[in-house]
Amino acid sequence: MTVDRKQVLSTLWIFVMFNYIYADILMLIVNPAMYQKAAAAMTPVVVLALAILMEIPIAMMLLSRVLPYRANRWANIIAGVESSAFVAVTLRGNVPYYYVFFASLEIACTLFIVWFAWSWRSPQN
């Protein structure tokens, strides 16, 4: 049985995004003051930078399905490394256990994406 890597990669990015969203919603419910404090300290440039960083995995849901092999492979490797690093940085300080749980799932999945894309061999071979 052959695996459609494009479909698998897109589905993995969907899984990652649902985890990002639910972790953020849960943080908003459990500790809204922390979110307000963080938002108050953000400049418009920081907000833009965070929006760009979050747009990468969002775009990967689509790009994983439509990019040709070589661009797809490298886009998933780069986006997976960036997303793993971004989540790892958020684990600094005193973070709640449920956030560590979600972050662990997110990092494991994005590192799997990196490996899955790295091990993807050219369909022409």
Image: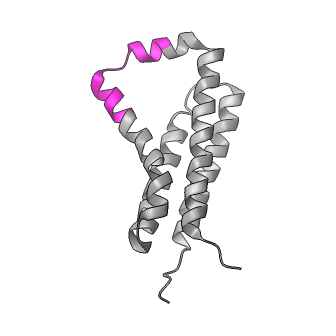
Q: Residue shown at 42%/61% (left/top)?
A: 75
Quarter of the image for residue 8 reads bottom right
Number of labelled discs?
A: 0
Closer to the camera in the image, 14 or 114? 14
Of all residues shown, which one is farthest toward the left? Answer: 45
Q: Is residue 43 magenta?
A: yes
Question: Image point 60% across, 55% down: which residue?
Answer: 11
Q: Is 55 on the left-hand or right-hand side of 33?
A: left
Q: Position of residue 1 (x, y in %)?
A: 71, 79
- Dividing the picture into quarters, in which one does residue 103 lie? top right
Q: What is the image's colouring? A: one colour
The spot of residue 16 in percent (x, y) is 59, 45
Residue 113 percent coordinates (x, y): 57, 59
Query: Would residue 17 be visible to someone looking at this image?
Result: yes
- Left or right: residue 61 versus residue 29 is left
Image position of 118 with respect to 107: above or below: below
Main secondary structure type of the part rendered in magenta: helix
Residue 70: x %, y % from top left: 40, 73
104 displayed left or right of 69: right
Tell me which segment is drawn in magenta: 36-50
Residue 105 forms part of the magenta stretch: no
Give the residue displayed 44% in from the left and 66% down from the top: 72
Residue 32 or 69: which is nearer the viewer? Answer: 69
Q: Is residue 82 above or below residue 28?
A: below
User: Which residue reaches farthest top?
Assistant: 33
Residue 77 visible to an observer of this rendering: no
